[in-house]
């Protein structure tokens, strides 16, 4: 299902727009739909993309766990755009795609370790409104990951909540990124 664009696409122009378009096409093959919406407010666009560049440099948390956490949060919110793009990024980073594809149904799947399940449960607990995070969840993950990685995990889930809620609220849907991986795209589970 293509994006419905509850706010119409902005015309991406000017020097910043040309640079942004060139970078997006080089990195992902096309301009993401959310860039067309963000470009209505250029200071927000620059702030978001600057922040995302900094987020990409965080390295304390295992990249597999980071991906599982982000996809679990996106699935909980029901953001098909985020699941689609997240799957594509996982493919580009060389993650095990058969496992990544199972994230939206992680509770029924048998491919995840206990730590991976704890990370996804934490991501869902943070994403639920109001959050349902418990002291035991944090203590267990902190003991397993260490303080630095635990802070990164918590922040990456919060960042994914921002992304997914923005995209879902503005009608952005799967853009076909996962199709480029030659594997079935992630299905968006129905929101509980």
Image: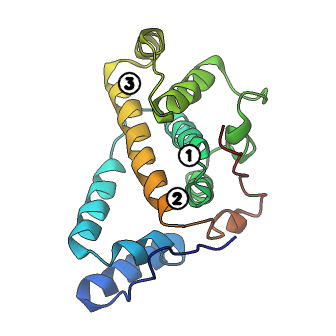
In terms of secondary structure, where does tag 3 sit? helix
The quadrant in which the N terminus is found is bottom right
Residue visible at 53% across and 36% down?
A: 69
Q: Which residue is mark 2?
A: 168
Question: Which disc number belongs to residue 77?
Answer: 1
In x, y percent, where is residue 4? Answer: 58, 74
User: Which residue shows up at 49% across the image and 38% down it?
Assistant: 66
State which tag comes first along the sequence, 1 or 2: 1
Q: Evaluate whether residue 14 shows in this view.
A: yes
In percent of width and height, residue 22 lies at: 39, 82
Q: Nearer the viewer, residue 23 or 123?
A: 123
User: Between 31 and 104, which is closer to the camera in this rendering?
Assistant: 104
Q: Residue at x 37, y 27 (%)?
A: 149
Which type of secondary structure does the marked residue at label 2 adopt?
A: helix
Q: Residue at 78% across / 28% down in the picture?
A: 108
Is 87 drawn above or below residue 133 in the view shown? Answer: below
- The part of the image, by quadrant, that contains residue 18 is bottom left
Of mark 3 and mark 1, the one earlier in the sequence is 1
Q: Of tags 3 and 2, which is closer to the observer?
A: 2
Q: Earlier in the sequence, mark 3 or mark 2?
A: 3
Q: Nearer the viewer, mark 3 or mark 1?
A: 1
Cβ–Cβ under 8 Å for marks 1 and 2 = yes
Name the residue tied to disc 3.
Answer: 150
Dot 3 alpha-carbon crowd within 10 angstroms: few under 14, some 14 to 19, many 20 or more = many
The secondary structure type at the circle numbered 1 is helix
Distance from label 3 to label 1 (Cα)? Answer: 22 Å
- In the displayed structure image, the side of residue 2 where residue 170 appears, left or right: left
């Amino acid at each position: 299902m293509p994006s419905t664009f509850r706010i119409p696409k902005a015309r991406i122009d000017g020097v910043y727009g040309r640079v942004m378009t060139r970078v997006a096409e080089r990195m992902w093959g096309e301009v993401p739909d959310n860039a067309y919406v963000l470009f209505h407010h250029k200071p927000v666009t620059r702030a978001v993309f600057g922040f995302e560049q900094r987020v990409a440099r965080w390295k304390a948390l295992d990249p597999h766990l980071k991906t599982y956490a982000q996809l679990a949060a996106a699935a909980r919110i029901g953001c098909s755009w985020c699941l689609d793009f997240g799957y594509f990024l996982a493919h580009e980073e060389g993650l095990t795609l058969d496992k990544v594809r199972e994230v939206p149904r992680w509770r029924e799947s048998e491919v995840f370790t206990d730590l991976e399940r704890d990370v996804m449960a934490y991501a869902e607990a943070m994403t639920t409104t109001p959050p349902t995070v418990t002291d035991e969840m944090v203590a267990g993950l902190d003991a397993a990951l260490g303080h630095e990685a635990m802070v990164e995990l918590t922040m990456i889930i919060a960042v994914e909540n921002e992304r997914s809620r923005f995209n879902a609220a503005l009608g952005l849907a799967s853009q076909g990124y996962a199709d480029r991986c030659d594997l079935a795209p992630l299905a968006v589970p129905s929101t509980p």
